[in-house]
Image (cartoon, grey):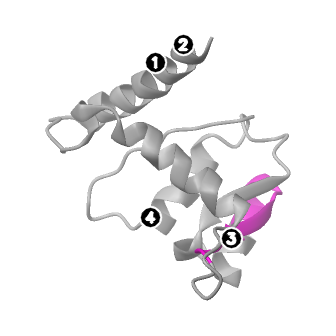
Amino acid sequence: MAAGIHITTANVSERDGAVALLALNSEQFRLVKRVMADGGYTGENFAGLVQSTIGAEMIIAKQSDLKHGRITPQRWVVERSFSWLDKCRRLWRNCERYLQTSRIMVALAFIRLLLKRY
């Protein structure tokens, strides 16, 4: 599974940040066939950018079906990843002075998670 971390300032939209992430790490994502994101990334323009940048299909993980109380499996993957990050207190607040430090803290949080699993 390919992964990348791209931290931006608050004035950069999530879509612009995602496009920058894919462009900066396009070599790392060359084998990726599908990209999963939440409903904030819906739209043909964004899906087209993903397709042209790394050649992958875009999958939108929809919110739960409120009528039936079900959570779609894809949405669970997205929410679970954010939940794992929430367990690291240092990431709760934006107290880092530099973007590079924030990126390293997110990477360390995932490394810690992986080490605990093995």
Q: Is residue 63 left or right of residue 113?
A: right
Residue at 30%, 34% in the rendered image: 102
Q: From which residue to which does the magenta span run?
A: 50-64
In the rendered view, would you say 85 is above or below 79?
above
Which mark is on residue 115? 2
Q: Nearer the viewer, residue 15 or 62?
A: 62
N-terminal-most mark, 4 or 1: 4
N-terminal-most mark, 2 or 4: 4
Circle 2 residues within 10 Å: few <14, some 14–19, many ≥20: few
Badges 4 and 3: C-beta atoms under 8 Å apart?
no
Badges 4 and 1: C-beta atoms under 8 Å apart?
no
SS for callout 1: helix
Circle 3 residues within 10 Å: few <14, some 14–19, many ≥20: some
**Disc 2 residue type?**
Leu
Q: Which residue was labeled with disc 1? A: 112
Observer-side mark, 4 or 1, equals: 1
Badges 1 and 2: C-beta atoms under 8 Å apart?
yes
Residue at 57%, 20% in the rendered image: 114
Alpha carbon separation for disc pair 3 and 1: 28 Å
Q: Nearer the viewer, residue 1 or 20?
A: 1
Residue 47 in the magenta stretch? The answer is no
**Disc 1 residue type?**
Arg
Q: Which residue was labeled with disc 3? A: 60
Which mark is on residue 14? 4
Alpha carbon separation for disc pair 2 and 3: 29 Å
N-terminal-most mark, 3 or 1: 3
Q: Is residue 87 left or right of residue 2?
A: left
**Disc 3 residue type?**
Ile
Circle 4 residues within 10 Å: few <14, some 14–19, many ≥20: few
Badges 2 and 3: C-beta atoms under 8 Å apart?
no
